[in-house]
Image: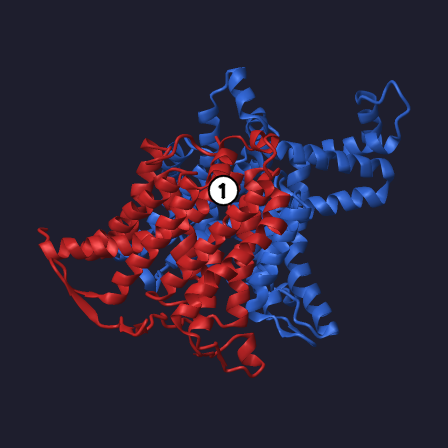
Chain colours: A blue, B red
């Protein structure tokens, strides 16, 4: 309550009797931007997430007779993709660059982490090495691709990614084991074989879904959220956003557009690298198609846009929806229609088109607008305004 | 490695044949891009539809999975032969193009190009998944006819310099180059083509002159779609057919083609298709493992050093 009053005093409401809810909203949004709040809120969400996804949904599923509960490995997978799309959103949602080649960074990190594990079987170092390789690769690819924009940028990133894919599949087989996939990954436990990844963190039987892998992914996610939030709310991130809105003006101000775009590209590749290394630790297997093919890059695009670009939560929510549909909904058998099975990608495509068409702010953005509209009218207007501002920004 | 004369000749022929398919795809994509400034990632889906419509019209095909199989339909097709397919496929492609322009492209003309890319990307996903779920996700054999107009086209013919070369592939080169030539003339030499070209430069001015540019838009879109579907039929007659070909065999090569040739230029799409076809054909015959890698790196170099392409004047979207 005191928070709200302080905000009201400092806000722009002093002159007129604006509804308190509006300033309350701004106080809330200010609170939401603070680092420690973001990290604490994310930590809370991460603590309840597996329980809700695996156990609660599992029980609900048992009651209604549909298997809608997640399996034990799913929460970690969602977090891994979540980390990637936080970075991808910095590029697509803020800087406005659509890359169809981020699988290159994801896959190269996964492969280098897997190869490194044979030298030193330490997951932590695997993540470091994988991220390092992805970063070093992103620099030259970004340096070349950033010089073009729009569809040319998309095609350039695609060509580099595809060249890597075909290298891993064919001539690079000596390194990657080609089409058979790479499975010699020496990372059984968090510390040199101790704490195996699929063991539960606690001895409590009802918290089985909290595995060591989940703990590892959750801590990585917290770091990613913290870094992502820092970037978004820093002057540096503000320039990214300005680049997405009007590149020319940023140039007129005297800033080096090329350098900022390149940095956005490299930073997003760092996130993809972390995700790729974690992915290979989680799956214990990597194949050129899951790692490097352009469909994987397309999946990153779908997740980000599905959830909603331009925020921290939206893309992660998109990653959750994507993986939930891919892994759980695909296994659901409906009474009248029958098994959804391979229809899941169709469902996803239809939802994706609807989102792009009707809700450019994504599922999360649409949900936010809806909540704002329902809670009070002035909040609703505010939500509408931000939507309009968002629409303007994308043009 | 020293190449024999016959090897060079067969590289050229294979390159022309693959290049002609790329050119068909590229022309369709480039006229849509040039005229409406619309980026169509569903272009590969039209190729896919062309291939499957061709498959169904051409012969009676045995189904092994998918929705139709699950409701008891084990075979599908009209057994109409290749001539029926060659007429029907472009017509159906044309119709789909008209509908697509009206219901998908038009609402997105005024929206940012990222949105156009995203919505057509989703649409391509839907088409691919629909085919996979209805007709089946398995791979079908290619649909080359054994005779056309009573002439046997399944036997290889002997050519000077080349030696034996499949006569069907030779015929494909003739057919596709005929279609490419007609399209080129239609855009360069007719009034319709003139309106389309003027629309590329300044659509508002064309509208002020009292020309219904919207009607031309639908026609251009439908023409591009018909060409893509036709390319799908031709591709299906030499390569196996599966739901993935829309992206792997068509969408990605089509974009590479127009990037090499220069966006918005029909001449560029033809040249770009030929260049890419020759690269693929030459590499496949010599260092086949590196074929795709060299292809992509060539396009990357092209984009860096000559972003306007072979025949383009300016970059679209910059």
* Viewer-proximal residue among A317 and A342: A342
Res B68 quadrant in image: bottom right
Residue B238 in the figure: left or right of residue A259: left
Res B312 quadrant in image: top left
Asked whether residue A193 appears in the rendered view, the answer is no
* Viewer-proximal residue among A45 and A354: A354
Above/below status of A22 relative to A74:
above
Residue A263 in the figure: left or right of residue B234: right
Residue B23 in the figure: left or right of residue A265: left
- Residue located at (63% from left, 47% from top): A356
**Residue on which the image places disc 1:** B192
Q: Position of residue A226 (x, y in %)?
A: 59, 38
Mark 1, other Cα within 10 Å: few <14 / some 14–19 / many ≥20: some
- Residue located at (44% from left, 75% from top): B80
* Viewer-proximal residue among A275 and A205: A275
* Chain under disc 1: B
Above/below status of A250 relative to B100:
above
């Amino acid at each position: 309550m005191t928070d709200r009053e302080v905000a009201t005093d400092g806000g722009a409401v002093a002159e007129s009797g604006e509804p308190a809810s509006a300033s309350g909203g701004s106080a809330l949004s200010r609170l939401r931007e603070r680092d420690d709040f973001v990290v604490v809120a994310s930590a809370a969400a991460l603590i309840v997430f597996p329980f809700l996804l695996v156990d609660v949904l599992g029980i609900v599923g048992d009651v209604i007779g549909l298997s809608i509960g997640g399996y034990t490995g799913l929460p970690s997978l969602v977090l891994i993709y979540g980390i990637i799309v936080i970075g991808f959103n910095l590029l697509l949602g803020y800087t406005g660059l659509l890359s169809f080649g981020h699988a290159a960074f994801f896959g190269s990190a996964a492969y280098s982490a897997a190869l490194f594990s044979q030298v030193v079987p330490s997951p932590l170092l695997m993540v470091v090495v994988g991220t390092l390789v992805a970063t070093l690769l992103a620099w030259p690819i970004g340096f070349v691709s950033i010089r073009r924009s729009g569809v040319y940028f998309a095609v350039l990133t695609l060509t580099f990614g595809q060249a890597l894919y075909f290298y891993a599949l064919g001539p690079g087989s000596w390194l990657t084991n080609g089409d058979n996939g790479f499975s010699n990954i020496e990372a059984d436990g968090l510390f040199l074989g101790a704490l195996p990844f699929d063991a539960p963190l606690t001895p409590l039987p009802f918290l089985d879904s909290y595995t060591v892998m989940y703990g590892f992914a959750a801590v990585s996610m917290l770091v990613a959220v913290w870094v992502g939030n820092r970037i978004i709310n820093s002057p540096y991130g503000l320039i990214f956003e300005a680049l997405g809105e009007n590149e020319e003006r940023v140039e007129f101000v005297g800033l080096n557009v090329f350098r900022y775009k390149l940095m956005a590209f490299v930073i997003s590749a760092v996130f993809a690298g972390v995700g790729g290394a974690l992915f290979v630790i989680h799956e214990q297997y990597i194949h050129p198609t899951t790692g490097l093919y352009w469909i994987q890059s397309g999946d990153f695009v779908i997740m980000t846009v599905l959830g909603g670009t331009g925020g921290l939560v939206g893309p992660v929510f998109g990653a959750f929806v994507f993986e939930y549909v891919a892994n759980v909904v695909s296994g659901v058998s409906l009474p009248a229609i029958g098994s959804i099975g391979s229809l899941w990608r169709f469902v996803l495509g239809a939802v994706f088109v609807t989102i792009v068409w009707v809700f450019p702010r994504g599922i999360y953005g649409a949900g936010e607008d809806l909540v704002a509209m329902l809670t009070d009218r002035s909040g609703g207007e505010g939500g509408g305004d931000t939507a309009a501002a968002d629409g303007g920004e994308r043009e | 490695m020293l190449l024999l004369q016959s090897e060079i000749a067969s590289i050229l022929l294979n390159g022309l044949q693959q290049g002609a398919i790329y050119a068909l795809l590229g022309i369709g994509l480039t006229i849509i891009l040039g005229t409406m400034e619309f980026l169509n990632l569903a272009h590969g889906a039209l190729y896919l539809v062309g291939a499957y419509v061709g498959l169904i019209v051409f012969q009676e095909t045995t189904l092994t999975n998918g929705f139709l199989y699950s409701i008891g339909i084990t075979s599908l097709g009209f057994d109409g032969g290749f001539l029926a397919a060659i007429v029907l496929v472009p017509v159906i492609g044309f119709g789909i193009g008209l509908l697509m322009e009206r219901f998908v492209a038009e609402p997105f003309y005024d929206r940012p190009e990222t949105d156009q890319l995203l919505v057509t990307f989703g649409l391509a996903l839907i088409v691919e998944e629909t085919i996979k779920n209805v007709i089946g996700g398995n791979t079908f054999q290619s649909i080359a006819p054994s005779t056309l107009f009573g002439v046997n086209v399944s036997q290889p013919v002997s050519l000077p310099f080349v030696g034996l070369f499949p006569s069907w592939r030779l015929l494909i080169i003739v057919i596709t180059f005929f279609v490419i030539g007609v399209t080129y003339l239609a855009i360069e030499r007719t009034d319709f083509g003139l309106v389309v070209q003027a629309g590329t430069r300044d659509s508002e001015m064309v509208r002020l002159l009292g020309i219904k540019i919207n009607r031309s838009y639908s026609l251009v879109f439908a023409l591009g779609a018909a060409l893509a579907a036709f390319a799908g039929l031709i591709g299906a007659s030499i390569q196996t057919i599966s739901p993935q070909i829309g992206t792997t065999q068509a969408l990605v090569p089509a974009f590479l083609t127009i990037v090499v040739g220069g966006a918005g230029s029909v001449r560029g799409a033809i040249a770009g298709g030929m260049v890419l076809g020759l690269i693929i054909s030459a590499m496949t015959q010599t260092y086949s493992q590196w074929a795709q890698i060299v292809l992509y790196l060539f396009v990357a170099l092209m984009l860096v050093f000559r972003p306007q392409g072979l025949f383009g004047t300016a970059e679209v979207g910059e």
